[in-house]
Image (cartoon, coloured by chain):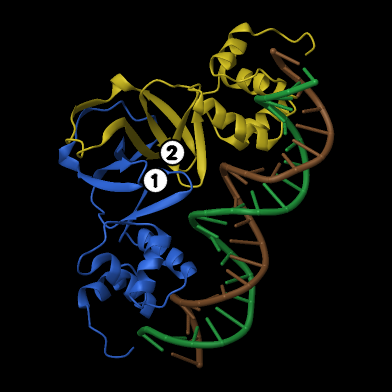
Chain colours: A blue, B yellow, C brown, D green
Amino acid sequence: MHRDRPYRPILEKLRAAGLRPTRQRLGLARLLFGGEGRQHVTAEGLHNLAVEEEISVSLATVYNSLNQFVDGGLLKEVVVESGRSYFDTNIEDHHHFYIENTGQLIDIPADHVGISHLPPIPDGANLRSVEVLIRLVS
Amino acid sequence: MHRDRPYRPILEKLRAAGLRPTRQRLGLARLLFGGEGRQHVTAEGLHNLAVEEEISVSLATVYNSLNQFVDGGLLKEVVVESGRSYFDTNIEDHHHFYIENTGQLIDIPADHVGISHLPPIPDGANLRSVEVLIRLVS
DNA sequence: ATACTTGCAAATCGTTTGCAATACC
DNA sequence: GGTATTGCAAACGATTTGCAAGTAT
């Protein structure tokens, strides 16, 4: 690859996830994790962003990359609407506001929600996550 | 309509929601709210059930009916996976366990989860709901 | 050199819709 | 009779996949 900005940390991120740092994965990762760092994106949104930034990548590759980033622990998927997937660059435990009419997602740090007790987990099951989703309309 | 079991309460439910009690809506409503009362269904699951019970109804009508039931306040939609919608006959405020590998949903009554504090709601927004989803794997 | 990745177009999945035939009031 | 509802098939939007061409190590 030609002499682009190195972005060592992003390159490392990809390697850490076991992904070859290809032109398109580097470009997408830079949009997601570099500089201003997007919080929440949809596949289509990220593709549009890439097009604006002159990063040439197909929508199929955006989908594939997002899934690989999720599998590699670089992103979390947030499900708030059936039919559209959001991806969150915040991979820590946390919660969300979802503004239904605008489709906007807003992070809520885990410690801003106090959960005082939970029911016992069904036999034989293992806890994956506890997600609080606060639906709003504006 | 021929002399089927009357199921007065179900008929009333439909009327209350402003829906004509047609053969297929009555059949579906009976599956959902009558007797054993299913908790959680998908459109396809309900359609299969209908076929088993010899209720002749098309998948399109199942989808339409489920949406009408939601609009009429007879059902709630639960979003846990993008790409598939679950419908819940429990219309009270409550939470869910979701067993990811089996796709099983389990209700948690609202008072089994203690939420001690929430962050302030963004300006100009109105609260719709607070949903706790506990993801599990078994 | 080899295995992995890409892009395109076609395929798939769940869901919605147009419209003619049918059922409800 | 007039309007709402149904069923089918076609349309849909989001996402995935097969495969030939291109790229990273």
Residue A22 visible in the picture: no
**Is residue A132 or residue C17 the one in the foreground?**
C17
Question: Would you say the residues marked 1 and 2 are in contact, meaning their CB atoms lie under 8 Å apart?
Answer: yes
Name which residue lies at 44% across and 22% down.
Answer: B91
Q: From the image, which quarter does the C terminus of chain A lie in?
A: top left
Q: In this rendering, would A35 be left or right of B82?
A: left
In the rendered structure, find residue B92 and report the number of the disc placed on it.
Answer: none
Instruction: Give the residue pinned by disc 2.
Output: B79
Q: Quadrant of residue A24?
A: bottom left
Name which residue lies at 66% across and 37% down.
Answer: B60
Q: In this rendering, would B117 be left or right of B137?
A: left
Name which residue lies at 32% across and 58% down.
Answer: A75
Q: In this rendering, would D3 be left or right of A74?
A: right
| Residue D6 pos. (x, y %) | 72, 30
Instruction: Give the residue pinned by disc 1.
Output: A79
Q: Is residue A74 above or below residue D9?
A: below
